[in-house]
Amino acid sequence: MSADQQNIAHHDEHGSMTKKKIWGVFWVLLGITAIEFFIALVLIPRGVLSHPVGNIIYIGLTLLKAFYIVAYFMHLKFEKLGLIYSIIVPLIFIIFFIVWMLYEGNFWMHIRL
């Protein structure tokens, strides 16, 4: 495969990011942000959701927004599987260790009481 063919193949790999797709991702991100604002400004103050449940929903929605940003705007969705694993696996370990540390901290706090 010549250099021109490789360049064309590389360009076609990212060719699915059209203006329509970019605007679609923009509207999804805007919708998720609107849901977060609705939860923060309406549901939690009126007592429909408690703060801990709201925080869990915020974390989930924020991770969803991070996925869209990384996948589409950083073009990770179009990269090779090895590169994706090099980001996903450490992220899973980081989340695991954060949850583990929170659990351990809670355990030690209750032992001291």
Image (cartoon, rainbow, N blue to C red):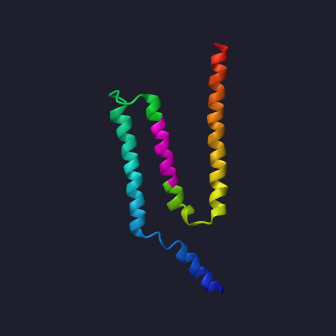
Magenta-drawn stretch contains 59 = yes
Q: Position of residue 15 (x, y in %)?
A: 49, 74
Query: Residue drawn 64% across and 40% down?
Result: 96
**Residue occupying the far top of the picture:** 113
Residue 112: image x %, image y %? 67, 14
32 sits left or right of 86 in the view: left
The quarter of the picture where residue 38 lies is top left
Q: Is residue 60 left or right of residue 20?
A: right
| Corner quadrant of residue 94 | top right
- Image quarter of the N terminus: bottom right
Note whether 13 is above or below 107 in the view shown.
below
Look at 47% across and 71% down and name the residue there.
16
Is 111 drawn above or below residue 95 in the view shown? above
Left or right of 13 in this view: 54: left
Above or below 113: residue 25: below
What is the x, y in percent for residue 19?
41, 69
Residue positioned 65% across, 34% down in the render: 100
Above or below for 40 versus 28: above
Residue 79 lies, in percent from the top left, at: 59, 66
Magenta segment boundaries in residue numbering: 56-67
Quadrant, the C terminus:
top right
Q: How many marks?
A: 0
Mostly what secondary structure, the magenta segment?
helix
Find out whether residue 2 is within the magenta segment: no
